[in-house]
Image (cartoon, rainbow, N blue to C red):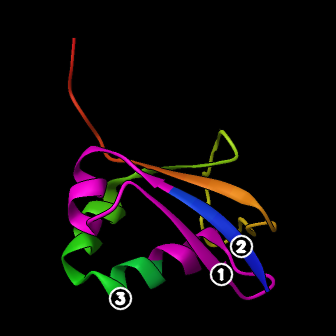
Amino acid sequence: MSTVDLRAFAAARAALGWAQHRRALDAGATVADVLAGLAAEAPGAGPVLARCAVLLDGRRVAAPADAVVPDGARLDLLPPFAGG
């Protein structure tokens, strides 16, 4: 078992209903596993999560299915946003 700290921003926060959350994971869980679990718990969040950029300990994850989440990591869920 391991844990991950999750932070959700903007539309991801609204869809999930929280801004910060700690989650227990099975050893070897990937970023894709975490996202699938979140989408299963909050079905309306699936479309938002599919569009999010995900940062694993501050670095963008290009291939969520290949990115194993180490114990004590932080995942940031950043939906697209506009600004200027």
Residue 28 within the magenta-colored segment of the rendering: yes
Q: Which mark is residue 80?
A: none
Q: Is residue 33 left or right of residue 71?
A: left
> Looking at the picture, which amino acid does disc 2 mark?
Thr
Name the residue carrying label 1: 24
Is the residue 56 above or below the residue 15 in the image?
above
Q: Which mark is residue 40?
A: 3
* Residue at figure coordinates x 65%, y 81% from the top left: 24
* Residue at figure coordinates x 79%, y 86% from the top left: 1
Q: Secondary structure at mark 1?
A: strand
Q: Position of residue 72 (x, y in %)?
A: 77, 62
Mark 1 touches mark 3? (CB < 8 Å): no
Mark 3 or mark 2, which is nearer to you? 2
Quadrant for the C terminus, please: top left
> Looking at the picture, which amino acid does disc 1 mark?
Ala
Q: Which residues are magenta?
A: 7-35
Say few, some or many: other residues with alpha carbon within 10 Å of mark 1 (under 14 / 14 to 19 / 20 or more): few
Q: Position of residue 69 (x, y in %)?
A: 73, 67
Q: Is residue 67 left or right of residue 34?
A: right
Q: Earlier in the sequence, mark 3 or mark 2?
A: 2
Say few, some or many: other residues with alpha carbon within 10 Å of mark 3 (under 14 / 14 to 19 / 20 or more): few
Is the residue 14 above or below the residue 39 in the image?
above
Between the residue at mark 3 and the residue at mark 2, the CA separation in whole angstroms equals: 18 Å
* Residue at figure coordinates x 62%, y 73% from the top left: 65
Q: Secondary structure at mark 2?
A: strand
Is 64 in front, or is 17?
A: 17
Q: Position of residue 79 (x, y in %)?
A: 32, 47
Name the residue carrying label 2: 3
Residue 21 within the magenta-colored segment of the rendering: yes
